[in-house]
Image (cartoon, rainbow, N blue to C red):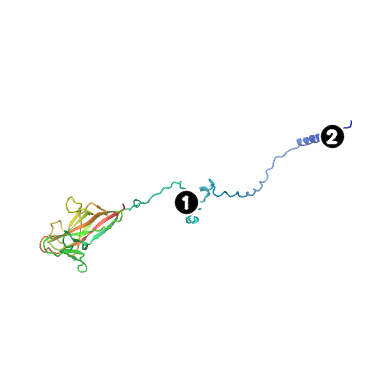
């Protein structure tokens, strides 16, 4: 029987495969070489723009913003307002009050209560009865108050001291000095520094709201009429030292000045005002 072409074809294929295997088995495979690295490829296209209004958590943080990148010049006026701040954010508000302002030391000041603003004490009489104003240019030693009545007696005056106390401040009276003129051995000049609470009574006795801070005499005491200044010139004398006194906006501070004649025609004695010193501090 005659062999078919089909059988011959199969045998030929088998033979070809066996021959290829024999060739591969007999080949020597060399190791991969270490040639130069090829160039890096180009960066891919940018990603799509994010959806407006959708937060991107972690997209921008402190490491994404260079120091000084955001300044007032880069923020338009009115850009940041209350509407831009999350209402759930806790904000600490610090109030600034007068207690946050502190003087390194109390501020010292002085005030001169001129005698020409005084008026006679007592009641019912004319404000300047028996008094004379002795001022410049008629008297270069002025301003002063004198007594025109030659009868012996005590002639007193009420002299207000309107201290300027700033709102909320604390003013403390620290000292005082009297100005006077005394060229007679029959008279003396004195000044008593006093306070009184506005709207209350002060009868200059124990139990009233008036407080006597200190009293000064041109001589040694209230009976030293023999004293007279050594020179024909205006004089000053400090009040005795006293404990500093706080003055409030409800305190009336004044001087009770007096010229006292021990005999008729007592001579030339004049009251020339009081200078007070004080400190002002914050509340």
Question: In front here: 42 or 192?
Answer: 192
Task: Decide: is 187 above or below 61.
Answer: below
Q: How many marks?
A: 2
Label 2: which secondary element: helix
Gap in angstroms between the C-alphas marked 2 and 1: 91 Å
Relative side of 162 to 7, left or right: left
Question: Residue 142, image x and y in percent?
Answer: 20, 65
Question: Residue 115, image x and y in percent?
Answer: 21, 62
Alpha-carbon neighbours of circle 2 within 10 Å: few (<14), some, or many (≥20)?
A: few
Furthest residue toward top: 1
Alpha-carbon neighbours of circle 1 within 10 Å: few (<14), some, or many (≥20)?
A: few
Q: Quadrant of residue 202?
A: bottom left
Furthest residue toward left: 264
Which mark lies nearer to you, 2 or 1? 1
For marks 2 and 1 on the same chain, the one whose residue lies earlier in the sequence: 2
Question: Residue 176, image x and y in percent?
Answer: 22, 57
Q: Which mark is residue 172?
A: none
Identify the residue under disc 2. 6
Q: Quadrant of residue 185?
A: bottom left
Label 1: which secondary element: helix
Identify the residue under disc 1. 83
Question: Residue 186, image x and y in percent?
Answer: 12, 61
Furthest residue toward bottom: 138
Question: In front here: 31 or 63?
Answer: 63
Residue at 29 percent across and 55 percent down: it is 280
Cβ atoms under marks 2 and 1 closer than 8 Å: no
Relative side of 89 to 183, left or right: right
Quadrant containing the N terminus in the rendered view: top right
């Amino acid at each position: 029987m005659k062999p078919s072409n089909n059988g011959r074809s199969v045998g030929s294929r088998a033979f070809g495969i066996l021959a290829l295997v024999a060739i591969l088995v007999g080949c020597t495979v060399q190791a991969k070489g270490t040639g130069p690295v090829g160039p890096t490829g180009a960066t891919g296209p940018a990603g799509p723009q994010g959806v407006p209004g959708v937060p991107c958590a972690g997209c921008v943080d402190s490491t994404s913003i260079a120091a000084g990148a955001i300044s007032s010049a880069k923020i338009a006026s009115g850009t940041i307002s209350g509407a831009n701040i999350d209402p759930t954010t806790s904000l600490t508000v610090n109030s600034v009050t007068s207690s946050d302002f502190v003087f390194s030391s109390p501020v010292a000041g002085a005030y001169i209560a001129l005698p020409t603003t005084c008026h006679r004490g007592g009641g019912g009489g004319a404000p300047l009865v028996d008094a004379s104003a002795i001022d410049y240019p008629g008297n270069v030693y002025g301003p002063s108050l004198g007594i025109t009545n030659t009868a012996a007696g005590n002639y007193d005056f009420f002299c207000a001291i309107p201290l300027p106390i700033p709102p909320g401040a604390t003013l403390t009276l620290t000292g005082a000095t009297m100005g006077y003129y005394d060229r007679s051995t029959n008279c003396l000049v004195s000044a008593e520094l006093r306070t009184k609470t506005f709207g209350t009574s002060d009868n200059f006795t124990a139990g009233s709201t008036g407080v006597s801070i200190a009293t000064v005499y041109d001589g040694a005491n209230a009976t030293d009429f023999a004293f007279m200044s050594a020179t024909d010139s205006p004089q000053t004398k400090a009040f005795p030292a006293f404990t500093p006194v706080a003055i409030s906006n409800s305190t009336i501070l004044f001087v009770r000045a007096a010229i006292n004649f021990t005999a008729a025609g007592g001579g030339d004695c004049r009251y020339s005002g009081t200078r007070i010193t004080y400190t002002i501090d914050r509340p």
